[in-house]
Amino acid sequence: MPRNPKTPQPIDPEQLRQAFAKRAFVLFVIVAGLFSVLGARLVWLMIVQYEEYRTQSEDNHRQTVPMVPVRGLIYDRNGHLLADNQPILSIAIVTEHVGDLDRTLFDVDALVGLSADERAAFKDRVRRKRRPLEEIPLKTGVTPAQRAIVEINRHRLPGVVISPESVRHYPFDALFAHAVGSVRRISEEDLIDLDARRYRSTRFIGKRGVEAFYEQSLHGEPGFRQVEVDVHGVERGEFSRQRPSPGHDLVLHLDVELQIAATRALGSRRGAVVAIEPKTGGILALVSNPSYDPNLFVSGLTAAQYQALLDSRDKPLLNRATDGRYAPGSTFKPIVGLAGLALDLTDWEATYADYGEFRLPNQRRVYRAWNWRPGQPGGQGIVNLRQAVFRSSNGYFYNLGSQMDVDALPEFAAQFGYGRVLSLDVADADAGVLPDSDWKRGERGEPWYPGDTVNMAIGQGDLLSTPLQVATVASIIANRGMLVPPRMLKSSDGVLPETLAPNAQPGRVEGLAETDWEQMVDAMEDVIHLGNQEYLRNGIAWAHIGRDIGYRLAGKSGTAQVVEIPQGEEYDEELLDEYSRKHAWFMAFAPADDPAIALSAFVENGGGGSSVAGPIVREVVDAYLLGKRPDTDDPAPPALASDAPLTPAAAGT
Amino acid sequence: MARDFHYTLPAGTALAQRRLYNVHLDLTLLVALIAIAGFGLLVLNAVSEQAGVVTGQMVRVGLAFVVMVALAQLEPRTYLRWAPIVYLIGLALLVLVLVLGVTAKGSTRWLDLPGLPRFQPSEMMKLAVPLAVAWYLHERSVPPRGRHLLVAVGLCIAPAALIAPQPDLGTSLLVAGGGLTVIVLAGIRWWLVAAAGGAMAAAAPVLWLFLNDYQRKRILTFLNPEQDPLGAGWNIAQSKIAIGSGGLFGKGLGEGTQSQLDFLPESGTDFIIAVVGEELGLVGAMLLLALYLVVIARALFMATSSPTTFGRLVAGALTLVFFAYVFVNIAMVSGLLPVVGVPLPLVSYGGTSAITLLAGFGIVMSIHSHRGW
């Protein structure tokens, strides 16, 4: 590019300097402009958006750390601890802080040893992890020595924490598993319904029994600490703290000794015993057999262990006392008799000739006596209502039932709690089934046949009830028609938030005279006490439990058929599968004139009510009325290593 | 030679001014620079957890001031004479870096020559390029045209091209920018500047192809910081929170939760302005900005008063490089520019940039105080 000769090089230095000064000034204006941009940016961030950034900065370094409240204690009526809390050490892992999880597990295993179960359970929990930075338990019940080993190797084990944990402990192991229930680790499904704030760091929740029903009261209110954390989540200081308030302590009506007596009486048989104090409705004993050790659920079952419990044919997890539905059999007969009186279909004098076979007019079907054999129709001869009760005449009640209008019997029976939940605070108590015409149409799409009432009159057919319901019936008869709803809770140290079952109102069975109740009680006393009479005139339980009894016991046996025996075939216990045999029932209360205890005993596939369930009732009532005591302050027998102090129980509930 | 103080000084400072001038220093510039350095040490002290960090930094900054004073004593004609030589040596060293440089943190910027401390040749180019371009232009027609302009631009681009692949895009741009500033100061037409700017914007997509993944990521993060708030966007999000939460008066020195609890990354180095904002508030940050503005204004004025083209171009360009540092750093930390590794002059922890920048002001003072050449 040729130089332009017309452009002489400027030679005046001052002119050059001026030109530069001009340019420098322009650049300085640009500089100042860009500085203004920076200044404006700072004003924008620090003044205009100040609130937003201040909030973000607070959120960054402030963290709310929940403090788990201590779970309330559960006592029996005499101050024995049924559920308490024990401190344990556990090794947990915060997976976010771990580089190589397998490697960490390997290291921990090398230091303190991990069982295959612990590994499996841990992996399972990692999969179901529900919160970020959650401490996932790996090994519970760590000894101080093991703790020391882990602490020494801390630097090699980032993310491994040893945390003290307060966990539920059930001193009586399996004894109260069904009555008190247990806590379990909170699962993902639980979280859907839980108050996220209250349960933010809670690890256990009551499942089943009192633990479940009174979960709100027992849980307590969590405390919170406001702490300052750095970017790594490491705590640097504390702003404030609000202490957790522990859960309410509960005193139950349960009586440890009676519970033991009932459990012993049942022995190894599948079944249930429920005992109620009629005046208060307090549940004194609630046994379901087989049981399980609730402590296993606290420490955590392996999947295999849990599956084994689920799969067992004996169904140890089933609470037979409150959830088992069984035909009540002949224990229902007193109700039918009272219904007949209330409906004016019979009185105490009217008789029925029970010669074993009953037929509805114009029908072929034969309703048989319990002592029917092929070729021998059985029956109890000529019986009035009292005799029909203590002999458990099928014919009398077939006949009485056949005279009742379609829904009259269910309507009357409902007053005793059949088909309803009358208990105030029994978690998941089952309502059983009280069939009536509506039910049958809805459930079966069939009309109600007269035969249905006939069947129901001896506690068979579609009628199903739980041992708790049958014990409640005994309690209502013991109270001469007064219903006092059954309940677990005796007292507590404060007002509890739980809503009690809304349908469980105190009440009175209607339509019966005082004398009707007394005579029915007399008839039920005869079941046990009337002996040394002529043929077919002894109380049917007398031979089994009535010969040597030292108090007045009123009761009624029941033997409920499990499988339908075809017409005309013999019922032979020996030929039936163990799980198809009849259920044995006995409901009773004592002392008959001023009852202190009303109860039901049930043995699944146990056979005869009087011979199998009767002795159980006798043993339990013996223990309660004649045994150690209920009302004295005897220390607990050494077998029950429970030296808990009596809880300061506030006014009754 | 006429003294050209066009502003009045408080009584008594005139004497100090004259005495300092005799040792080739400028009172206003010196005081403002010391104030900035002192401000920086104060803030650094508030965020440094280990003992010795502040002492170490004091030593480095002190050394930088010594360098500045020493360079102010050299005569401008020395710079003029050495400018092309230093430039050529610098280019050679940059080539050496590419061949046998020391790699640290994924980039190769350092030379470890026997008998010398480890150093960054790119750093000296920040001074050498403006000097060389000014040397080239001062004997030729000003404003430069045609061939001269191309050569001058070439002088700027050659070292930048050698620095960019280290990779160090920030320094590369600063080095080229220093030289190009000389050209702009030399008086080329504004439309040419605008056209060059436009051409660069047009070339941006081409430049994109030469960027490393991490550089691309920085730019993408800048364009859309919410895209990855816990990853690459984290730094800038946290620095904005730090600055914004400082409010008008700040949380107090040492009381900034973002700075003290490690939410703010690089709190002592590149992101230190966020500490200033959080702990000293808008007032503190504006004070620092004001000090920088004083330095730039004074230095530009000193450049203007230089009697030679070389002196004016060098002093003006070095001042604007200083400004570039300040602007790019604060704009980056406050989320106006993508994250590039540019420290805040004299405040960020580290000695290299302090030495380079104060060396630059040493040259500015030399140019300003030596009149007879």
Image (cartoon, rainbow, N blue to C red):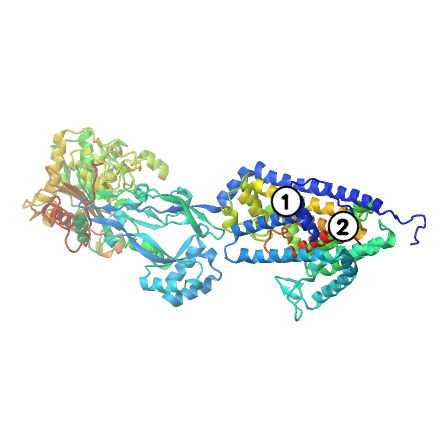
Q: Amino acid at mark 1?
A: Leu
Q: Residue at x 73, y 45 (%)?
A: B301
x, y percent for residue A504:
26, 34
Left or right? Give the position of B358 relative to A125. Answer: right
Total labels: the figure holds 2
> From mark 2 to mark 1, how far is it between C-alphas?
22 Å
Judged from this view, the residue extending furthest toward the right is A5
Visible in this render: residue A323? no
Is residue B334 or residue B143 the one in the foreground?
Answer: B143
Q: Nearer the viewer, residue B35 or A618?
A: B35
Q: Quadrant of residue B63?
A: bottom right
Relative to A106, is B369 on the left or the right? right
Q: Quadrant where the C terminus of chain A lies? A: top left
Does B50 sit above or below residue A65? below
- Could you tell me which secondary element the residue under label 1 belongs to? helix
Residue A378 spot, x, y in % from top left: 16, 45
> Which residue was labeled with disc 1?
B291
Number of other residues with Cα within 10 Å of mark 1, as a class: few under 14, some 14 to 19, many 20 or more: many
Q: Is residue A568 visible?
A: yes
Above or below, comparing residue B86 to residue B313 in the picture: below
Instruction: Please give left or right for residue A45 compared with residue A417 in the image.
Output: right
The circle on residue B181 is 2
Near-viewer residue (A446 or B41): B41
- Image location of residue A400, percent across then percent down: 20, 35
Which amino acid type is marked by label 2?
Answer: Thr
* Residue B310, position as x, y percentages in the image: 79, 53
